[in-house]
Amino acid sequence: MKREVTAMKRRGSGFTLIELLVVVSIIALLISILLPSLNKARDQSKLVVCMSNLKQIGMGFTLYADDNLQQPPPNQLRVDAAAPIGGTPPDFRDSTWWYYNHMVPRFIPSREKSGTNSAFGGVFRCPADKIAGRAYSMNIFASNYDQTKPFATAYARGKPFNPFSVKSSQLYLLVGEAHAIFSDSENPSWYGTRYVIGMEGSSVYRKFMKATEQAQRGPFSGYIDFGKHKKRVNFLFADQHVETLRPTQVVEPDEANPTRWISTLRVQWSPEDPQWNLPTPQ
């Protein structure tokens, strides 16, 4: 009898190997069930933060316009013949590029110092892009600065417009998620986008999907970075609303020739987009 009691005590003092294996299997099963949901929730939170960033950047543009006769940053290559392209270092205060700290970021300050005194960190970072200190870029046509004017940034297939007075402003791109391709001397492991996008491309589709983006990183295809949010991207429009779209909502096969692609015109670079919405090989 004593021997039986002793054996029972031993068995009750801990788990058997089989019991431990069952518990581990149950935990592994629960993790496999919950992990996709947790990852999805994490990705969605990054998307929402990115949308909030663009909302705040849009507010910065509005405040800039209030101080500048309802005009957007002109994004000139240089302000006069003696000035270097992009402005004079170290503070670049003679530049009209939107992302310099004396321009739009004056109303929504950066959190990081950059090598060119431009927007870096804070709301200019997308949480889905770990190496981008600045993840957003302005539509060249929203600069409202014709390339016949002095020192204009050159562009093709489009017409400048004023985002603060254009009709159907809900259609026109102001700022989009772009490729971070330029390394920063103050933050060696981070990269920044170019100041404007949309300059090149013989069709609207090419601007979205085919124009080559390359500097210290790349090459990337298209001015818009569709790779950050599981094939979704956030756009800030001229009317200040932010929308999340998939590539198939932005471009689509041409009905007359499905081997070629066109823009859906849901996101427009300029008022001339219908004119330049030419079927283009994918």
Image (spheres, rainbow, N blue to C red):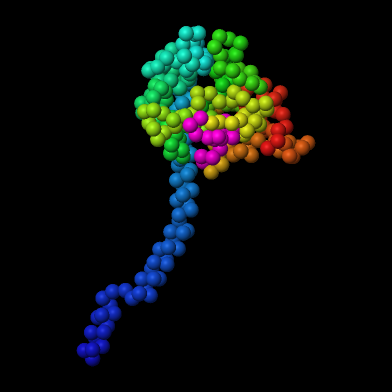
Residue at coordinates 46% horizontally, 49% vertically from top-left?
39
Residue drawn at (59%, 35%) of the image: 221
Q: Is residue 8 above or below residue 192?
A: below
* Magenta stretch encompasses residue 224: yes
Q: Quadrant of residue 266?
A: top right
Residue sitting nearer the eye, 199 or 272: 199
Q: Which residues are magenta?
A: 215-229
The location of residue 1, given as percent across then percent down, is 23, 91
Q: List x then y, in percent, for residue 162.
A: 57, 17
In the depicted structure, whether residue 265 falls above or below residue 47? above
**Where's residue 46, x and y in %?**
45, 40
Residue at 48% across / 31% down in the picture? 216
Q: Quadrant of the C terminus?
A: top right
Give the overall secondary structure of the magenta segment.
Answer: loop
- Horizontal relation, residue 145 to residue 15: left or right: right
Furthest residue in direction left, as rendered: 2
Q: Position of residue 179 (x, y in %)?
A: 51, 33
The answer to if 144 sits in the magenta stretch is no
Residue 65 makes an appearance in the image: no
Please count the marks in the image. 0
The answer, for residue 194, to whether it is visible in the render is: yes
At x 41%, y 29%, the residue is: 184
**Residue ranking furthest to the right:** 256
